[in-house]
Amino acid sequence: MNAPVSGHVVGLEQREGEVFDLGYRHYDGPRGGRGKAFMAVYDDGIRSVLGLGRGVAAKMMCGIFGLLVLGPAIFIISVAGFMSSFGGETDEIPLPKHEDYYVLTFIILLLFAAIVGPALLSPDKRNSVLSLYAVRPLKSLDYAIARWLAFFTFAMAFTIVPQALLYLSFVLSDDSPLGYIKDHGRDLWAIFAIGLILAAFMTSLAMAAASLTSRRAFASAGVIAFVFITAAIGGFGGEILTSDQDREEHGAVGNYGDEEVQAPDGDAAHYIHLLILPDTMIDGVSRWTFGDRAHFPVSPWYSAMTIAAVIAGAFGITVFRYRKFGG
Amino acid sequence: MAALLSARNITKVYEDTVALQDVTLDVEQGMTGLLGANGAGKSTLMTLFLGIIQATSGDFQVFGEDGGDPIQAHRLIGYSPEYECLPPNVSAAEFTTHMARVSGLPRTEARSRATDVLRHVGLDEERYRPMGTYSTGMKQRAKLAQAIVHDPQLVLLDEPTAGLDPAGRQEMLELIAQTSSEFGISMLISSHLMGDIERTCERIIVLEAGGVVEQGDVSGYTTDTETLALEFDEGIEAVAAALTNKGIAVTTEGRALLIEEASQDDLDTIRDVIVETGALLHRLAPRTQTLSDIFRRPAS
């Protein structure tokens, strides 16, 4: 048998300074292991969200959502700037503050997660690309977590950057910028903390939905459906369980105006209301983080636990689905 | 020298189907063909060696190491599955670079190797196009590119000529054979087409219904036989009739006459008959046994 010489036969010699066709060459450099493979999948996830190396539609998607989440911040900053340039007091007009911001962008963030997020997992499954990852030096879970973190990076940017811009504009437009930072130092860590929670919420929902189906559209619909169906259960449940006394005092569940209200123990209506995840997220967790607890009937700890449970459950689904390639 | 891949008494059972039964084989350096009909267990064997699925029983080794933890071995293995596995909205340049990086190559090296490999497989011009727009032949080349971009020692190609026309198949096989021989990359190629294996491989493993029925050097199977083959352009019937009259047993196979164990006297008679009948002889040679013959033989 005329087997080729073992090891690597040099077919084409590479000389320094050559720029023309070298064809196939042997590679003798370093070969990374799982860590490098993990980073490569993460980087590819970032490129995928940005649409790099992909078509025009993929490139536009990220840009459009980026503009949409930044839009309100740009608007607020512009209006405040316009007012102050005419010598008006910006405090006089009710411009949204940090704690109001996610009221404006939560639905955009949710749509971003639903539409763009599944692109990081579902198509690889649908197009059998996973079988190529299965023969690379990484484990199935490395792949899934690298993808999860790639989307999480964008989710963090989309939640934090607009708020940070807002904060910067508040600092710069204040008569005493340093004084503003001193007085509002808490806002900074709140921006970071809520960014982290909201990003984890969006990412875990999108990735869990994507891990359950190889069709992107189903995953997108799944994310939206999950939020709406749980909200419907929370809403109807709240209506059914609301006591007459409660209704007389406060009207419908959740309509608490500016009063600081804590639910009396055992008031089931308020707890089932936690299933309205956007309310729980925005009014329960987000406002609480910014030190404003006037808008939610139950203790913020219950809101935080509800969101944590959703994040943990959804993350668990993703981990389970990617415990092994082809599993 | 240790075999690159070796299997000892491997059995793989899916719920109610036996995919592989007591398979023992070695894959050595060079080009090895894995021949078998659809469902013979070729893909199962490959995915088992790659660590994607687990054997029900038996042992196997990859690069001389037990196949338990495939991560290490994966750095030096390339694989192209039978089915489509390329993301349609991604360009070949992007994807091949990415796969090189996942195999552990540094970023700049991955990019330059992807460019070189895509040129090597003939996708130079089209490398920035989304792969969903590629023809079947181009997809097969892109699949080969991602399998060799990290310069592996062993590449497993599952039906690399699937869906190609004869000319495309020939080109693909030449590319694979050239890649293997010029750069010393060992290959295990599965096919249900014996012609593919015969033309490109040095060794062959024949699978049938989950078991190995043959394994050895291709040259061992394609030796000359005692059968004399005479191919004619015209006048084959006249020659056949004349030879039968003179007591020489002939069988007709297409445009050829086959004569078993022809003696010197027989050869003289054959020469005379051809002259007498004026038939147009195209070729006269001892018949070479082909891999088709192995398939015609009942499995033992």
Image: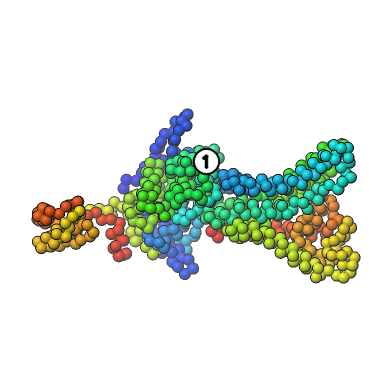
**Residue at 32%, 50% in the rendered image:** B199
Camera-side residue of A226 and B281: B281
In the image, taking residue A30 as reference, residue B256 lies left or right, namely left
Q: Indicate the position of residue A269 as horizontal and vertical percent values.
A: 81, 67
Give, as a three-letter code, the residue at label 1. Answer: Ala
Q: Which element carries disc 1, helix, strand or loop?
A: helix
According to the image, what is the colour scheme of the structure?
rainbow
Which chain is home to disc 1?
B
Q: Quadrant of the C terminus of chain A?
A: bottom right
Q: Indicate the position of residue A84 as horizontal and vertical percent values.
A: 85, 38
In the image, taking residue A306 as reference, residue B219 lies left or right, namely left
Residue B69 seen by the camera: no
Vertical arrangement, residue B266 with respect to residue A6, above or below:
below
Vertical arrangement, residue A162 with respect to residue B9, above or below:
above
Residue extending farthest to the top is A17
**Residue at 85%, 37% in the rendered image:** A85
Q: Indicate the position of residue B256 as horizontal and vertical percent values.
A: 21, 57
Camera-side residue of B140 and B97: B140
Q: Indicate the position of residue A323 as horizontal and vertical percent values.
A: 58, 58
**Residue at 73%, 54% in the rendered image:** A107
**Residue at 83%, 41% in the rendered image:** A80
In the image, taking residue B154 as reference, residue B276 lies left or right, namely left
Camera-side residue of B276 and A252: B276
In the image, taking residue A125 as reference, residue B235 lies left or right, namely left
Residue placed under numbered mark 1 in the picture: B110
Q: Which of the 4 quarters of the picture holds residue B239?
A: bottom left
Residue A296 seen by the camera: yes
Near mark 1 (Cα within 10 A), the count class, few <14, some 14-19 or many ≥20, is many
Vertical arrangement, residue A225 with respect to residue B134, above or below:
below
